[in-house]
Amino acid sequence: MTSRHEAYLRHANYYAGVVTKANGLYGSGQQSSWNALSLFDLEWVNIRVGFLWAASQSAANRAAAQLCIDYLLETTLLPLRLNPHELLRWCEAGRASAAALSDRNLEGCFLGNIGHTYHLLGDFERAVQFYGENLEIARELGERRAQAVALASIGAAYLEMGDARRTLDLCSESLKICRDIGDRRNEGIALVSLGNAYEQLKETDKAIECYQLGGSIARGVGDKILEGRQLNSLGVLYAGKTELAIGYCEQALVIARETGDLFGQGLALGSIGAMAKAAGDLPRAISAFTERLAIAREIADWIGESKAIAGLFSSYVATGQTDKLVALSKRRLAIAREIGDRQAEGAAFGDLGFAYSAVGDTERALAMIDERLAIAREIKDRNGESKGLFNKSKILWTLGDRSTAIVLAQASLAILRDIDDPQAEEVSVQISVWLRLS
């Protein structure tokens, strides 16, 4: 008679094979990718049960440890069904199993996967740390594909931190390796990351070239997730041409919905909301941001939630719905503190200052703006400091303290001119008006 342990082992072994099959199909052509997603969804409940059992037994059982690893060797599909916090736990179990088996190569892979989950959680510095450890092991073992993946991942994280030049260097190195070894799928990923970097640097022609090449590869290998990201990036690039831009993002949204890619849906909805708001279509913007907010909360995407809140905040300001601003700002502040993002925390205090001012609570408004100024000065966020100074000056002007208001506005203007910020013109005009009235 089969023991309970043997039954669980057989079950886990079978569904590890299903995961391997699905991952093998995905990215090997359009129809194969759809088949992979269908198979993965059909067996998801059993996949989850099998992995959790293997993970629970891995410390004491080498066969279970190997099964735990088999479920996680490719993580392309897992982020579609696990929120980042769950994915992190799964990847940490994989790393522990790799260490138990003394498999240095697999340990490196899981370090990279852990880095990816921190990337999704918005902790980019920690993501770079784990990606870097993965890269070090890949170089030590001569694993060129793993090197290419790690380099592109580090580059993507640096882009999130605003260092587009470093992203270009890292992703160019990744691209060269991918082309040398014939890895088309990761070549496409590197190209899209390069496009994002060029877009951030305002080198539009190069960005378009990279996106088009990356998109062509994504369609060729059937990587629907990458195709969706590429379309959304093109939409963002063409933001000045609203209908064209929204068209690209809506294509990305369709793909994300078809594949069950909730993270991709959130990205596309956020882009659509931002473009609709810029075009003055506030109802459409509010609808898109509201849907993005719901998805972000469903998958515990704190960064996405914070961005959705920021979009809703500005849209509600534009429509005069000031009664909703305080609650939104408090939630954004809580998220910033949870993920340890001091710049976002400062911005949330700034939003709270505006929100309290809008409902007539100037005392709290000034207190919140002072918090924003303190953080901006602490982290040397000059743009944030200038905004805090200008917002404080406007409140003081309404309270009748005109001389202090002008002094603060002039300090804000000096910073804006020093950092070449286009808002300098708005502040300069306001100061001129106030000086005439004083």
Image: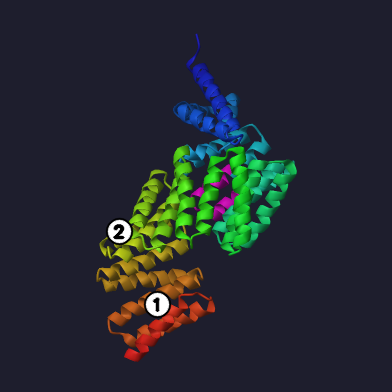
* Total number of numbered discs in the rendering: 2
**Could you tell me how far apart the alpha carbons at marks 2 and 1 are, in whole angstroms?**
23 Å
How far from the left and from the top, in percent, is residue 282? Answer: 34, 60
- Alpha-carbon neighbours of circle 1 within 10 Å: few (<14), some, or many (≥20)? many
Residue drawn at the location 52% of the way across and 27% of the way down:
54
Looking at the rendering, the stretch of residues picked out in magenta corresponds to: 113-132
**SS for callout 1:** helix
Q: What is the number of the mark on residue 269?
A: none
Residue 325: quarter of image: bottom left
Residue 70: quarter of image: top right
Residue hosting label 1: 390
How far from the left and from the top, in percent, is residue 101? Answer: 64, 31
Sequence-wise, which precedes: disc 2 or disc 1? 2
Q: Quadrant of the C terminus?
A: bottom left
**SS for callout 2:** helix
Residue hosting label 2: 327
Residue 49 visible within the image: no
Residue 322 visible within the image: yes
Q: Amino acid at mark 2?
A: Ala
- In the depicted view, which residue is nearer to us: 354 or 135? 354
